[in-house]
Image (tube, rainbow, N blue to C red):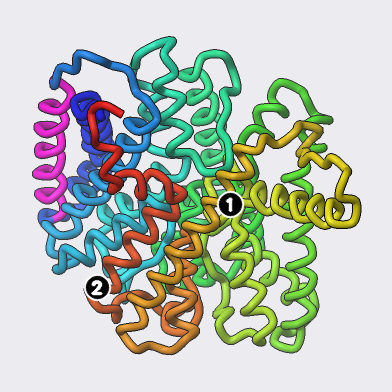
Amino acid sequence: MNIRIVLNYVGHILRIEGLSMFPALLIALYKGEHASFLSFAVTIALLALLGTVAVRIKAGDKLIYSREGFAVVALSWISLSFFGAFPFYFSGEIPSFLDSFFETVSGFTTTGSSILTDVEAMPMSLLYWRSFTNWLGGMGVLVFMLAIVPMSKGDGSPLRIMRAESPGPAVEKLVPKLRYTARILYIIYISMTLIEIILLLCGGMPLFDSVLHSFGTAGTGGFSIKNASIGAYDSVYLQGVISVFMLLFGVNFNFYYLILIKEIRPAFKNAELRLYLSIVAVSVAAIAINTRSLFENTFEAFHHSLFQVSSIITTTGYATTDFDLWPQFSRMLLLALMIVGACAGSTGGGIKVARLLILIKAMRNSIQKMIHPRSVKLVKVNGVVVEKEVLAEINVYLTFYTITMLISLLGVSLDDFNLDTNISSVVSCLNNIGPGLGMVGPTGNFSQFSPLSKLVLSADMLIGRLEIFPMILLFAPSSWKRNI
């Protein structure tokens, strides 16, 4: 392990985090939030100092191999969450550092789970920082770094980092130079965020609310500045805009790139996109029918069903109504959607529709192989053969995913809460959803969990966002050996 180069990259990330806090610092100054201003000022200074020291560490070998790539990603996200918690803690708004850490991990991993019992009582500067962590974590902090910081060229190092951070079975370059790929992704990301802000403003939502809810939508993080989440805005238009944009941010960003270069037919023929939209359509129809009696008319049932399906499958976590009061069938369907998640290469969490698609095709081939033992069946997606290595990686991923979930359930169950709360809290955090069922439903929060459970759930959020491998390999002794 080349520890020096790993620390060098982490140093860049810490300096970027410090710069990211400046808007919150200015908001605190403008609003006269003295405690928040001091907390941001101290944190920015600390990040600048530590980041500069780390960046100046000289590394003889500047190459990033797979293990260094995984280490950079894992340590960067842990550091971001650790130092990002300081403003909440130093200001005294969240007196417990563990709670501050939980809230920040939830923000950067775009989970949206919260320990806050009264969000609206928070200072505006901290609300801004809380929501901005959703936005920054959505596309990926290291992807942002690759877009703006000149790194080593021609050795594949940036691609290894991007693959380790980006959600989905595979990450490829959109254009030959990875730095341009990162820039294209962020240009699309920023443009879509700005469009949503404008549309929300047109619907009468205040500017501050529009910006922060767009941050939460774009990052599919779901941090709201209202206790009633999006339900606080009694507007079909506003809720409809957010519904649509949640679905859009749950789509693989390669789709938007293909649209930009006018490759319309390949974009819409994508098998993952079609499965994603099919799951959404079937789920919305099923839940609307199942919950029809709870609403005044069919349109209202459809409206809330669309919003919650969009929110859950994209792992955003916004709510317009208390879906924990819905019939058991609808609740279980939403729980299933939590696990499925959005498309690979999107800002959403979950196991990803791409993996589900590949598994379905692999299972179909296995069944046909049993019937016709001598036949040769290949798994193909969009006409491209899925390599055996990818299939093996998906199987390993699902194995670790299941083991992580079971261990987490055992840890959280020590709090002796009901089954709905235990299962959905773990599923929610591991898949970066936000709300679950029971005590952690849309009207609840995670404040009543013990310190042990909060640590377990914080780890789940990081493991889920980084798709397991970076966090697992970080603690593997072989990863830290110099000569392998």
Residue at 82% x, 37% y is: 269
Q: Main secondary structure of the magenta part?
A: helix
Residue at 74% x, 67% y is: 283
Instruction: Categorize mark 1 by other alpha carbons within 10 Å: few (<14), some (14-19), many (20+).
Output: some
Which label sits in the foreground, 1 or 2? 1
> What percent of the width, then of the height, locates residue 276?
72, 52
Local SS, label 2: helix
- What amino acid does circle 2 point to? Leu
Residue at numbered disc 2 = 452
Local SS, label 1: helix
Query: Between residues 410 and 72, which one lies in front from this camera angle?
Result: 410
Residue at 58% x, 36% y is: 170
State the residue lying farthest toward the front.
Answer: 374
Q: Could you tell me how far apart the alpha carbons at marks 1 and 2 are, in whole angstroms?
A: 29 Å
State the residue lying farthest toward the right.
Answer: 372
Position of 364 compared to 359: left or right?
right
Q: Is residue 207 magenta?
A: no
Q: Earlier in the sequence, mark 1 or mark 2?
A: 1
Residue at numbered disc 1 = 395
> What percent of the width, then of the height, locates residue 243?
63, 58
- What amino acid does circle 1 point to? Asn
Quadrant including the C terminus: top left
Q: Against 251, is 187 above or below?
A: above
* The quadrant where residue 403 appears: bottom left
Q: Against 180, is 254 above or below?
A: below
